[in-house]
Amino acid sequence: MARPKRGWNSHQLRLRELPHFARLRREDRFRTADDAEWRGAADGIAGPAGWYSIAGTYADWGCRLIHFATRAEADAMQRWIAESGIETRPGPAAYNGPQLGVAGGEPS
């Protein structure tokens, strides 16, 4: 007996609504200001509800895929990424403050 197909989940539905994407190639974490900057650019291009961001897989490993409803919005975001230089900016500095001691170890 064939099993009925399960319903779509919200992630799948969102990707179907927003089929076009821009690639933001970056493996390091973003500084807080850089993260807010690219999110603000996406909001300016498509509005707060007009884009969706996911981590890339397989061929897009190390990328953040920013999905949009139209090809023009995705192209505008890709141009912004290239012009801003956000992909080559340095990541946040390593935390250099005090650390917690674990299992009776001495805190630094």
Image (spheres, grey):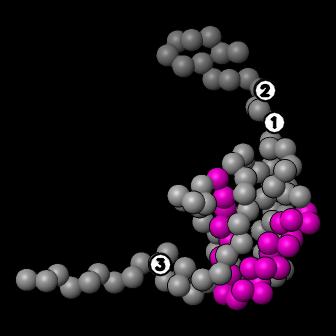
What is the magenta range? 62-84
Identified by mark 2, the residue type is: Asn
Quadrant of image for the C terminus: top right
| Of pointers 2 and 3, the one earlier in the residue sequence | 3
Q: Identify the mark at residue 93; answer none if there is no mark.
A: 1
**Residue for badge 3:** 12
The local secondary structure at tag 3 comes to helix
Residue at position x 49%, y 75% from top?
Answer: 11
- Whether residue 48 is visible here, answered yes or no, is no
Say if the magenta span includes residue 10: no
**Residue for badge 2:** 96
Residue at position x 84%, y 50% from top?
Answer: 88
Q: Nearer the viewer, mark 3 or mark 1?
A: 3
Residue at position x 77%, y 84% from top?
Answer: 73
From the viewer's side, name the closer residue of 16 and 11: 16
- Whether residue 77 is visible here, answered yes or no, is yes
Asked if residue 100 lies left or right of residue 39, the reply is left
Q: Position of residue 35 (x, y in %)?
A: 78, 59
Q: What's the CA distance linking mark 2 and mark 3?
A: 41 Å
Residue 76, image quadrant: bottom right
Identified by mark 3, the residue type is: Gln
Asked if residue 77 lies left or right of residue 57, the reply is right
106, above or below 4, in the image: above
Asked if residue 75 lies left or right of residue 100, the reply is right
6, above or below 64, in the image: below
Q: What's the CA distance linking mark 3 and mark 1?
A: 36 Å
Identified by mark 1, the residue type is: Ala
Say if the magenta span includes residue 76: yes
Q: Nearer the viewer, mark 1 or mark 2?
A: 1
